[in-house]
Amino acid sequence: MEKFRNILKLLRLKHCIKNFLVFVPLIFMRDEGGGQRILYVLIGFISFSLIASTIYIINDAKDVEKDKLHPTKKNRPFASGKISIAEGFVYAVCCFFISIGLLSYLIVFHHVSFFALFNLLLYFILNLAYSLGLKNIPIIDITILTAGFLIRVMFGAILAGTFVSSWLYLTIVSAAFYLGLGKRRNEIKMVEGGIDGATRSVLQKYTLNFLDKFMYLCLGMTCVFYALWAKEYPNPYMILTVPVVIIIFMQYSLDIESSYDGDPVEVVFADKKIMAFCLLFLCMLFGIIYLL
C-alpha cells in the first residue's frame, strides 16, 4: 500500500484538477453532441492527465538533487529514495504510450480531429523543454505555464467538436498569467524568508515589484474579460456570476499574499472558502446554462 501511495504521489494525481479545464468547452454545449462527446472528453481527460504525469516524472528526476535540499520537495518519491529514477522512467514511458494510445483510438475509430493529438504533443514538447531548461528563462517560463492552461481548454474544445469564444479565450489567458506570476511571486518570498532553498535560478531574475504589478494587471484583465464574456452570453442571468468570480480571485489573492507557496492546486485545496465559492460558481453556471 505504501508503494502504491508513492506511485500516485509520483504521478501527482492531485494536479489532475488542472486537467478539468478540458471539460470547459463541453459545459457550454448544453445537449449538443450528446453522451458521445462527453465520452470523448472523458477519455481526453485521462489521456491529458497521463501525459502531464509523464512530464512531472521527468521534471522530478531532473531536479532530484535540488529537491533533496527543499523543505517540502525532499519528501517527493525520487528525492526521498522511495522510488528509484529507473523505476520512475518505466512509469513515465507507460504513461506516455497509454496517453497516445487512448487519443489515437479516438482519432482512428471515432474520427476525432487529428489536431487533438497535435495539442497533446504540443503540451508535452513545451513542458519537456520547460523541464530541460526553459524554466530558467524569465517570461518564457511563465508563458509556458500559461500555455499549458490554454492548451487544455483548446484540447477539450477539439474533442467536444466546438470552439472557444474570443472573450473566454482572453479570460483564460489573463487568468493563467495571473496564476503563473503569483506562483513565481510567492516562490521569491519563500526564498527571501529563508523557507525555500534557491531551487530555481530564474527567481534571481525577477523582482517582487515586477511580479506584483503584472500579476494584478492580469487579474484586472481577467475580471473585465470574464464580465464581457458573461454580458455577451445568450442567457442574461450569466452576468450574476461575475461577483462570485471576483470574490474567488479576491480570496485567492488574499491567500497568496500570506504564507502559501503560490501553487494554484495547493492554494485551492488548502482553502475551504475558495472551494465553497468555486462550488457556488459551478452550481450557478450549471443552473443558468441548463435550467434557465
Image (spheres, rainbow, N blue to C red):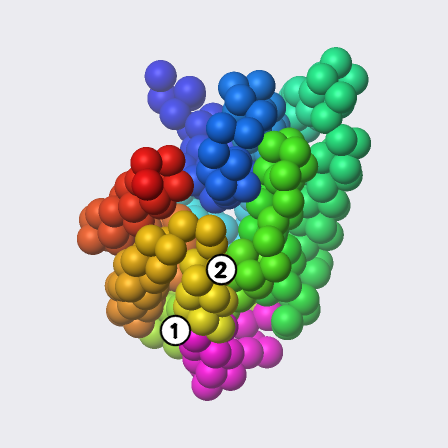
Amino acid type indicated by mark 1: Lys
Residue at image location 63% in from the left, 55% down from the top: 147
Distance between the alpha carbons at the discs numbered 2 and 1: 39 Å
Percent from the top left, x then y, of residue 52? 59, 38
Q: Residue 258 occupies which quadrant of the picture?
A: bottom left
Q: Nearer the viewer, residue 260 or 32?
A: 32
Residue at image location 47% in from the left, 54% down from the top: 233
Residue at image location 47% in from the left, 66% down from the top: 228
Magenta stretch contains residue 229: no
Percent from the top left, x then y, of residue 108? 78, 17
Residue that badge 1 annotates: 189
Q: Is residue 273 left or right of residue 95?
A: left
Residue, far bottom: 209
Q: Is residue 93 left or right of residue 63?
A: right
For label 1, the SS is helix
Percent from the top left, x then y, of residue 209? 46, 85
Q: Nearer the viewer, residue 51 or 167?
A: 167
Q: Main secondary structure of the magenta part?
A: helix
Q: Is residue 51 visible?
A: no
Is the residue 47 above or below the residue 29 in the image? above
Q: Residue 90 occupies which quadrant of the picture?
A: top right
Which segment did they paint magenta? 202-220
* Neighbourhood count class around disc 1 (C-alpha, 10 Å): few under 14, some 14–19, many 20 upward: many
* Lower position in the chain sequence, tag 2 or tag 1: 1
Percent from the top left, x then y, of residue 83? 51, 29
Residue that badge 2 annotates: 232
Q: Quadrant of the C terminus?
A: top left
